[in-house]
Amino acid sequence: MKIAFTFPGQGSQSVGMGKDLAENFAEARAVFEEVDEALGQKLSDIMWNGPEESLTLTANAQPALMAVSVAVMRVLEAKGLNLADKVSFVAGHSLGEYSALCAAGTFSLGDTARLLRIRGNAMQAAVPVGQGAMAAIIGLEHGDVEAICKEAAAGGICQIANDNGGGQLVISGSKAPVEQAAALASEKGAKRAIMLPVSAPFHSALMAPAADAMREALAKVTKHNPVVPVVANVRAAPVTDAEEIARLLVEQVTGQVRWRETVEWFAANDVTQLYEIGSGKVLTGLAKRIDKTVSGTAVNTAADIDAAIATLLG
């Protein structure tokens, strides 16, 4: 039996997240203070008090979610957890990959916060508001959605952005082709095809300027090989070389988040327990739908941390 730690992505943010950790644990407080300092902004104030529209901004949500994940990790470590001893792999959903890499020692906390601020700003700036779109397609297989995207892409960019598993795929690209693909999906028997209220077409070729910005930012930052392998989003396979990790993070900006395949890879490689470290429990729910042999546990409160420690170190 192997254990993997997973780290949530955008959409898992909520006003108030991490506040009880900061109130209960000096280690968590130190994380939020360090992130505030790295960004030159009181991000923790927005996280705990809102307003929600400020927290939802990509440039805020990304470092904020990472901060909560790393705060949980630091508390677990203070209670005796050694990641390399107890955990076989880490993985994160989109921005969560940065949280995973910070937890595994590839990037420092301050650098991770700054990288995610650059990433958030660059993704937002890559496409003028209103020109891109994303849609969730529920109830069709990957191959069907791929074929629909190919048909719609005659009119511009349209591709799979996230394969979340359980028949849930997200498509991304130029507005008209994505709208056409959503309509086609409904015609072809999708249970639902929902346009998403997002500010940019993430994980599509339209994000190429953001990929360039991340290539430049990642080249300048100090990197270490992770203490445990990271299962990379765009590869759905483990990686241990810091330079290769950086290349894959650049690829991830325009590439597909292969989350279904990541969980399937875990299941095929004797991972039976996933701990979702940070805000919410989206990944825990997805794991359940993807492979019943893998059980997930969300860890984001003081009680969750105590329960996880009892299991991991018991």
Image: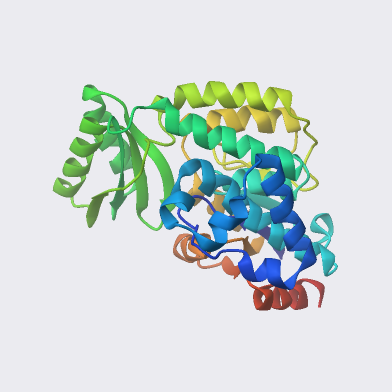
Question: What is the tally of numbered marks visible in this picture?
Answer: 0
Q: Is residue 195 left or right of residue 27?
A: left
Q: Which of 205 and 52 is in front in this view?
A: 52
**Quadrant of res 156:** top left
Q: Position of residue 269 (x, y in %)?
A: 65, 54
Please name the residue shown 47% across and 30% down the image: 254
Q: Where is residue 83 in the image (x, y as percent from the top left)?
A: 79, 57
Q: Is residue 71 left or right of residue 192?
A: right
Taking the view exactly as shown, the residue that stands out farthest to the left is 187
Q: Which of 100 and 221 is in front in this view?
A: 221
**Quadrant of res 154:** top left
Q: Is residue 123 left or right of residue 300?
A: left
Q: Where is residue 95 in the image (x, y as percent from the top left)?
A: 56, 44
Q: Is residue 39 visible?
A: yes
Please name the residue shown 63% across and 35% down the image: 115
Quadrant into which the C terminus falls: bottom right
Q: In this view, does 237 lie to the left or right of 221?
A: left
Quadrant into which the N terminus falls: bottom right
Q: Is residue 265 visible?
A: no
Q: Position of residue 94 (x, y in %)?
A: 53, 44
